[in-house]
Amino acid sequence: MSNQPEASVGRRRVLKSLALGAAGLSLTGLTACQDSESDSAAAVSLVTTLGQSTYPFEVPPLPYAPDALQPAIDAETMRLHHGAHHQGYTDKLNAALADASDLHDVPLRDLLADLEQVPTSIREAVRNNGGGYYNHALFWPSMRAEPEGPSQALTAVLREAFGGVDAFKEQFTAAALDVFGSGWAWLARAPNGALRIVQTPNQDTPLAQGLLPVLGIDVWEHAYYLNYQNRRAAYVEAWWDVVNWQQVEANLPSEQR
Amino acid sequence: MAFTLPDLPYDHDALEPYVDARTMQIHHGKHHQGYTNKLNNAIEGTKWERMPAEDILSHIDEVPNDIRTAVRNNGGGYVNHKLFWTVMSPDGGGAPSGALAEAIEDTFGSFDAFKETFSSTAGSQFGSGWGWLVVDDDGNLHVYSTPNQDSPYMKGHTPILGVDVWEHAYYLHYQNKRGDYLSNWWNVVNWDQVAANYAEATS
């Protein structure tokens, strides 16, 4: 690991170092995230803060009560999803990395963007459980009870990229419904700043495609089966009612808002 | 001729308490029906309509590009579930006898060792998929898992026993505890049917 940052170095050097190590991610994009001021939005970019986290990983607390997103998402699903599934990915990620001490200071984003650096004996475990840890940690704050709609600035961004907020929702929904089996649909940002809608199977992350996630929806059956059973479309439709657009905006670099 | 959803060979609640009635209703009536409909839509008006679904999967590489993924996913879903209902029974459980029992012992060392291998293979399939006991061209047994609805027929193997580990197969009753579902599932395995499948695959 030639690009492994030391534990004591400053955030900027960490970022520079991980950008060099993360194939496909632009230095510009990462520093832009880092430099974004939070005065225009209450939320901070989770894509930045979460990506910097290192071993050992802890399940972040839910930013609301398990029943806060009802009726879109029921309390039992939230409890299991956060307390059993997310906890399980976290425990398995920590177990996989326990003996790989040279990876303990590597930021999560770097691990997931460049899985080739992970020894083959634990690569699959890191891919699946690291992805599960990361994706769910982004997922919880991307929802909230009684959210406000997208700001004018975000509306303009979505209009330019997709033709409008409704057009974006339509394309994102189609991608979410089209995932066969377990996986996620994403709004993600390319190194050149372009916004794209992509899918990932299982717990693969956009990072592994050289993209930074902005908004993701979990379409594993565990995300909706208790309440919606086979009706994934009803889940996705209801999910739009709890999307935290302020967090979506905060996940974009400041120059793009 | 369009494929039709096979009837369940028992009542929805017949596999209680190991597989609950509501899961069976949705699994058979919604998920399997959905795969059936989508398979029919994908192959409508093509020569593939006139072939058994298992044979379509054996020749998946020859299916035209524009419908291959739909046929793979929904044809797999159709065939996998069709087998699944028959390898379970309210009178199931126990152990196989005869030629199948001998082949399992020869291949895996013992019936218990086979169960352990099968359970851990199915249990560790990450995401959606199936665990399988299959017969290859030479009549040998293998245990492996496949992702999503991929079928052993796609590898030229004949599945004789399969367990569905998509979350929809167990989530209403077992939630995240896939291991509990798998250990309970052995109580409903229809070994007579599995033995008949083995005999046919090796004949």
Image: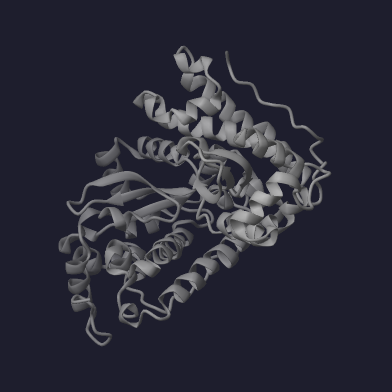
Q: Is residue A52 left or right of residue B172?
A: left
Res A27 visible: yes
Query: Image point 35% across, 26% down: which residue?
Result: B65
- The front one of B47 and B177 is B47
Check the picture and name the quadrant holding the N terminus of chain A: bottom left
Q: Is the residue B105 above or below the residue A240 in the image? A: below
Query: Image point 74% across, 56% down: which residue?
Result: B184
Residue B105 x/y as whole percent: 66, 56
Residue B94 x/y as whole percent: 79, 53
Splitting the image into 4 quarters, where does residue B67 fall?
A: top left
- The front one of A213 and B68 is B68
- The front one of A158 and A98 is A98
Q: Is the residue B173 above or below the residue A97 in the image? A: above
Q: Is residue A73 left or right of residue A188?
A: right
Q: Is the residue B10 above or below the residue B171 in the image? A: above
- The front one of A64 and A118 is A118
Residue A142 x/y as whole percent: 44, 57
Res A219 visible: no
Q: Is residue A3 left or right of residue A200?
A: left
Residue A180 x/y as whole percent: 47, 40
Splitting the image into 4 quarters, where does residue A2 fall?
A: bottom left
Check the picture and name the quadrant holding the C terminus of chain A: bottom left
Q: Looking at the image, how many numbered discs can be counted on the residues?
A: 0
* Farthest residue, direction bottom: A8
Q: Is residue A201 left or right of residue B180?
A: left
Name the image colouring.
one colour
